[in-house]
Image (cartoon, grey):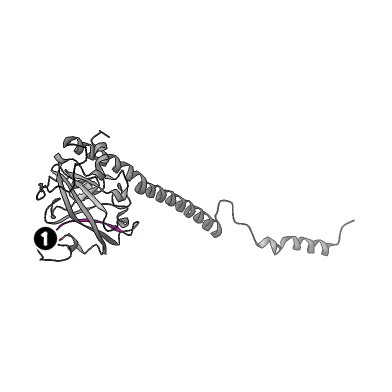
């Protein structure tokens, strides 16, 4: 039996009209939506941030660790070379109260050459650092304490000034802030041993270069003392300021007299006799 023609027509018409759901078609495969693009961008940015973090950590590790390792090796070599070339008695001087007359003052060597060795007991029994002529990066980043070429030499009237890093490249002045008035600082040159006594420190801006004057911070004044000035960055992990440590010459003794008793062991070790 044939069906109702009218019903058949209605059924056919209904099938031809798309449903409301049918109008929300899914995007063709292979085409990205805005949310897919944002998700991928977030993933890429996340990976880049992680990579940048790893690179930053490696750089910090290189700065705070590896530069110290490299610099320590070069400084140790410079100390041994100097100590062996200018080998003198390692037995302490019989009497450190002996008057040896005015200090002998040497001539500054060429840039990058060794002036002598600095010993600072406050910084530990193994603190032995070379003093090198010049304050350019090739000196400070590898060889330790650099001598400002426009300042005096050890023992001379005026200002014998040196610079050094605080946290990297050997960290030669990392503990400069721990110095206490009365602490001894010893400088050894081919001519002898110069004993300085720490007096005070000062925090200044990097632009305040008058700390290097013959009488620090006093332009035009004639020096009447032999001063040792040490400069480094401040704070310890920054460079916004400079910390300046001042010491005054207390006495000296020629190399032939032997070293001061407080550093005799270190002098012997530097010469390979300890």
Q: Is residue 74 visible?
A: no
Quadrant in which the N terminus is drawn:
bottom right
Q: Residue at point 20% right, 47% down? A: 187
In this view, the residue in front, 176 or 103, is 103
Quadrant in which the C terminus is drawn:
top left
Assign a secondary structure to mark 1: loop
In this view, the residue in front, 135 or 117, is 117
Q: Residue at point 34% right, 57% down? A: 236
Which range is magenta?
A: 213-236
Where 247 sits versus 141, above or below? Answer: below
The question of residue 92 being in magenta is answered with no
Residue 39: horizontal and vertical position, in percent? 54, 56
> 10 Å neighbourhood of mark 1: few (<14), some, or many (≥20)?
few
Residue 93 in which image quadrant: top left
The question of residue 220 being in magenta is answered with yes
Q: Is residue 63 left or right of residue 10?
A: left
Q: Magenta stretch mostly in which secondary structure?
A: loop
Q: Residue at point 32% right, 56% down? A: 178
Residue 253 in which image quadrant: top left
Residue 42: horizontal and vertical position, in percent? 50, 56
């Amino acid at each position: 039996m044939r069906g109702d023609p009218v019903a058949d027509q209605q059924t056919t018409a209904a099938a031809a009209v798309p449903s409301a759901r049918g109008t929300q078609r899914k995007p063709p495969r292979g085409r990205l939506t805005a949310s897919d693009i944002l998700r991928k961008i977030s993933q890429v940015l996340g990976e880049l941030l992680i990579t940048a973090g790893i690179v930053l950590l490696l750089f910090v590790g290189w700065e705070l660790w590896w530069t110290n390792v490299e610099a320590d090796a070069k400084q140790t070599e410079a100390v041994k070379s100097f100590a062996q070339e200018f080998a003198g008695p390692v037995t302490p001087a019989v009497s450190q109260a002996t008057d040896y007359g005015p200090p002998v003052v040497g001539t500054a060597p060429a840039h990058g050459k060794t002036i002598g060795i600095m010993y600072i007991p406050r910084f530990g029994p193994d603190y032995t650092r070379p003093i090198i002529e010049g304050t350019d990066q090739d000196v400070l980043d590898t060889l330790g304490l650099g001598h400002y070429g426009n300042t005096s030499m050890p023992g001379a009237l005026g200002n014998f000034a040196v610079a050094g890093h605080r946290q990297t490249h050997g960290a030669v002045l990392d503990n400069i802030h721990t110095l206490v008035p009365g602490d001894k600082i010893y400088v050894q040159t081919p001519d002898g041993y110069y004993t300085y006594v720490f007096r005070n420190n000062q925090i200044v801006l990097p632009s305040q270069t008058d700390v290097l004057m013959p009488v620090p911070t006093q332009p035009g004044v004639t020096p009447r003392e032999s001063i040792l000035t040490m400069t480094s960055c401040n704070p310890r992990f920054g460079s916004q300021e400079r910390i300046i440590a001042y010491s005054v010459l207390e006495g000296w003794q020629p190399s032939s007299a032997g070293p001061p008793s407080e550093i005799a062991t270190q002098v012997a070790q530097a010469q390979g006799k300890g």
